[in-house]
Image (cartoon, helix red, strand yellow):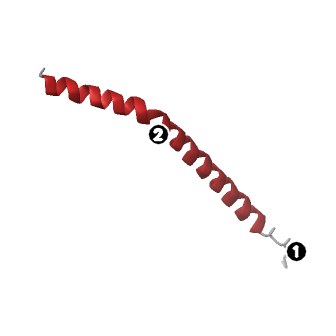
Amino acid sequence: MTVDDVSAVLVGITALRVFAPDVCKASRLLLRAGVRVGVSELLQNTARTPAPAPQAPHDQEA
């Protein structure tokens, strides 16, 4: 390994250490937002669906 390889590894490790917490927080935030949107979408779809009208029994003529 050369000095350039070592410095590249150190830069990568430093970048991970610096940006990993922000990436984790952002992914959690996006997941929460997606769950909220999904739940609200499900609630809206079920609230708008009307109940089926009861059907009268058919008289069978034999």
- In the rendering, at what x and y percent does residue 47 appear? 77, 64
- Label drawn at residue 23: 2
Left or right of 35? Residue 55 is right
Question: Given this view, does label 1 or label 2 mark the residue nearer the observer?
Answer: 2
> Closer to the N terminus: mark 1 or mark 2?
2
Instruction: Name the residue rendered at 66%, 52% in the picture.
Output: 36
What residue is at 52 percent from the left and 43 percent from the top?
Answer: 26
Q: In this view, does 13 lie to the left or right of 3?
A: right
Quadrant of residue 49 within the rendered picture: bottom right
- At label 1, counting other C-alpha atoms closer than 10 Å, the crowd grade (few under 14, some 14-19, many 20 or more) is few
Residue drawn at x 87%, y 77% is: 59
Q: What element carries label 1?
A: loop
Q: Splitting the image into 4 quarters, where does residue 17 fall?
A: top left
Contact between labelled residues 2 and 1, with CB atoms less than 8 Å apart: no
Does 7 appear above or below 57? above
Whether residue 34 sits left or right of residue 22 in the image: it is right
Q: Residue at x 68, y 53 (%)?
A: 39
Secondary structure, mark 2, is helix
Q: How crowded is mark 2: few (under 14 residues within 10 Å), some or many (20 or more)?
A: few
How many labels, in total? 2
Going by the numbered disc 1, the residue's amino acid type is Ala
In the rendered structure, find residue 35 and report the number of the disc placed on it. Answer: none
Residue 14 x/y as whole percent:
35, 29
Label 1 to label 2: alpha-carbon separation: 59 Å
Front residue of 22 and 48 = 22
Which corner quadrant holds the N terminus? top left
Residue projecting furthest to the top: 1
Between residue 28 and residue 50, name the one nearer to us: 28
The quadrant of the picture occupied by the C terminus is: bottom right
Residue position marked by numbered label 1 in the rendering: 56
Q: Which amino acid does label 2 sit on?
A: Val
